[in-house]
Amino acid sequence: MARDRMCVTMLADLTELRESVFAVRLLREEILATPLRPDAAARLRRVIVARNGDRLPAGTVAAALSAARATGGGVAGVHVDGAWLRTLAEACGGGAVRSGPGVPFHGRAAPPASRVPDLLAEMIETLNSPVAFETWPAPVRAFAAHFLVRLVQPFDAPPAALGFAVEVAVLAADGFSADRVLLPEPSAGEEVAASRPDPDEFVRARLDRLVERLAETQDLLRTEAARAVLASWADDRRAQGTAHRLNERQRRLVRWFAEQPAGDGDVAPRSLAFRDYVRLHSGRRAPSLRSLQRDWKGLRERGLLAERGGNLVLDPEALSRGPEISSG
């Protein structure tokens, strides 16, 4: 690696990445433009940070976002330097220059510790080069920085955690903030069939995974928005004496679907089987089974809830096409 300039051997042809880069930018704009209630937005941020930081040293994502705010985003906005990288390495578990053997990556053993200072300097030069600034889109720069950190392993911090932290900081400067969107897991792109490190394959794999994770982020946003719609519908229709009015049982059921699920950070849509709905109304004054069936059918036919496998579920698609929602 020392014989070649990294910026020459990496990412010489970006044409195959254009569609994916366009997709992530489009998804980013749609995600950032989606309005949420303040409480839902705060809850969702906590969930996204937790999922992005899964299996990483505590505070990795927060430290990377802090570094992005303090420096303008590292590679994406300013020149990288050793001090900036060391700050992230300390947050990831070790800011001292590596003196041990390191771990294999992409089928190659880590370079000897004696070469780390020279390789670190070359890595910084590569990431600060005009090629990186002028021709690499921000996600590509972020993934390239991650790859080089994993390859060089300049500090004692676990290379997977540090590579991800650098990536998080770079992406944050371009609107892909790790408290707003789900990012590729640190392991994405680790496995390759080649016998030598392949930066292009690494970047391609992580870019494809970013598209998938942004789609997952959209699903989370749509679920939260659907909860708000259900809550508003239940409250508004209760006060109107029209044919569209929900009875008290239906209103409670809609409210149950609209509420935050139990569990710390849980944002998964709720689901309820009809037998459990019947069980909730057991007792001396229980409504008839036919009345409960009408409740169930009415909510489904109005588009407030969907039915899957015999269960009622909160489904944003059902809400978007429901006849009662669209009719006002």
Image (cartoon, rainbow, N blue to C red):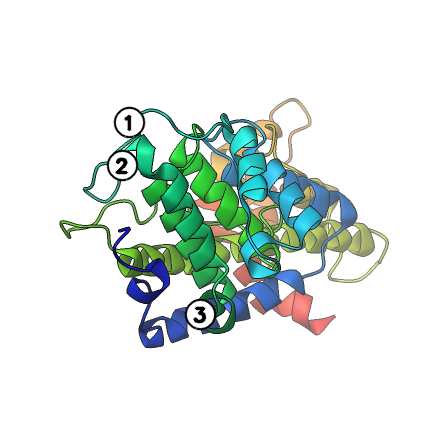
Estimate the x, y position of residue 281 in percent, counting from the top left: 62, 30
Q: According to the image, label 3 marks what residue?
A: 131
Task: Name the element at disc 1.
Answer: loop
Q: From the viewer's perspective, tell me whether residue 51 is left or right of residue 66.
A: left
Task: Name the element at disc 2.
Answer: loop
Q: Is residue 315 visible?
A: no
Pick the quarter of the image with the C terminus: bottom right
Query: Which residue corresponds to the image point at 75% horizontal and 62% vertical from the top-left?
Result: 243
* Image: 19 above or below 149: below
Q: From the viewer's perspective, tell me whether residue 89 is left or right of residue 62.
A: left
Estimate the x, y position of residue 113 in percent, counting from the top left: 32, 31
Q: According to the image, label 2 marks what residue?
A: 110
In-front residue for pair 2/66: 2
Q: Residues within 10 Å of mark 1 (few under 14, many from 20)?
A: few
Amino acid type assigned to the residue bearing label 2 in the image: Ala
Estimate the x, y position of residue 204 in percent, counting from the top left: 33, 61
* Image: 328 above or below 281: below
Q: According to the image, label 1 marks what residue?
A: 101
